[in-house]
Image: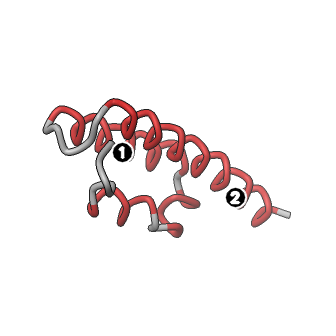
Amino acid sequence: MATELPQAWLAELNDQVALVADPDRRAAVLDEMAYAARRRREVDDGDLIDMLEIVESARLWALDESEKDLE
């Protein structure tokens, strides 16, 4: 496994405002960035799986935050 995840991907992941504003679109962007990092061999298969799981967790968190804002 790589020792660290791509910085650009991490920066996008940490943009909580954008993530809460549009969870599905941001998750799609993060997924594509993860696949692109794998194609460039910046991450291995294990890292890609981890990245995709993190994205799904972040998407679910953002959806929950969006619902809280509506209450």
Q: Which residue is mark 2?
A: 66
Q: Could you say which quadrant of the image residue 71 lies in? A: bottom right
Vertical order, 47 against 71 (above or below): above
Q: x, y (%) of residue 45? A: 33, 30
For label 1, the SS is: helix
For label 2, the SS is: helix
Q: x, y (%) of residue 14? A: 46, 66
In this image, 51 relative to 33: left or right?
Answer: right
Q: Type of residue at label 2?
A: Ser
In this image, 45 relative to 54: left or right?
Answer: left
Q: CA distance from mark 2 to mark 1?
A: 18 Å
Q: Type of residue at label 1?
A: Val
Q: Residue furthest right?
A: 71
Tally of numbered discs: 2
- Residue 39 or residue 44, whichever sits in front: 44
In this image, 48 relative to 21: left or right?
Answer: left
Which label belongs to residue 29? Answer: 1
Q: x, y (%) of residue 26? A: 44, 50
Which residue is located at x 27 percent, y 56 percent? 6
Which residue is located at x 53 percent, y 39 percent? 53
Q: x, y (%) of residue 23? A: 55, 49
Q: Earlier in the sequence, mark 2 or mark 1?
A: 1
